[in-house]
Amino acid sequence: GAVVSQHPSRVICKSGTSVKIECRSLDFQATTMFWYRQFPKQSLMLMATSNEGSKATYEQGVEKDKFLINHASLTLSTLTVTSAHPEDSSFYICSARDGGTVKAFFGQGTRLTVV
Amino acid sequence: GQNIDQPTEMTATEGAIVQINCTYQTSGFNGLFWYQQHAGEAPTFLSYNVLDGLEEKGRFSSFLSRSKGYSYLLLKELQMKDSASYLCAAMDSNYQLIWGAGTKLIIKP
């Protein structure tokens, strides 16, 4: 199957700082990328959907100025958590899909801890 | 509204068979996905059904009935490594995935 690489896998940052998470599709062109957040023992919560070259579409309740998403190329999307707070600590997962298929493939996830 | 229902937790014995059910209600339908997620890891793709019937892939099979809004994932010859959460997701008319809360499968020796 297609490979999606997400970095970093774990990050600890201080409250008030910003953290950038990268998501790369290694062997296909990701026309659409999805960013999810998952709290312990809960299912995936879609944060936003981004199409290459367009502004991301955020789900209700997700602050677009806090969670900056950039999808400037067909192989790379980034999520920046700005002015992170302890309540932002979570597991963030990206998934990518090319335009010719309905299947989406997941990155490895990023465990963010804000202290 | 859109909704996915699946059991919260199931327990089965190593070597046995287990069936995880999923019912869905979506605005339009473009297929039903099953993903496996081990604790602390991202989901991995298991199966995709868009037509009625059973799709078999090794020890795992997935079934879909579009008229009933129903799917199941069947796991045979259970192994300890199959202990994980199994996520059901339906794709709506906008090609967005609607996720279930996941079924935690516990395998006992």
Image (spheres, helix red, strand yellow):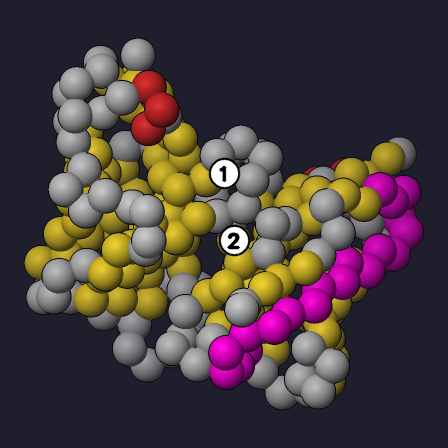
Q: Position of residue B78 (x, y in %)?
A: 81, 49
> Which quadrant would the C terminus of chain B be assigned to in this image?
top right
> Which element carries disc 1, helix, strand or loop?
loop
- The quadrant holding residue A41 is top right
How far apart marks 1 and 2 lie (CA) works out to 9 Å
Answer whether labels 1 and 2 touch (C-beta < 8 Å). Answer: yes
Q: Which residues are magenta?
A: B11-31
Residue type at mark 1? Glu
Q: Which residue is mark 2?
A: B44
Discs 1 and 2 lie in a common subunit: yes
In the rendered view, tell whether residue A6 sits above or below residue A49: above
Q: Which residue is mark 1?
A: B41
In the rendered view, tell whether residue B27 sits above or below residue A78: below
Q: Residue at x 62, y 87 (%)?
A: B51
Q: Position of residue B27 (x, y in %)?
A: 50, 78
Q: Residue at x 72, y 45 (%)?
A: B8
Nearest the camera: B21 or A109? B21
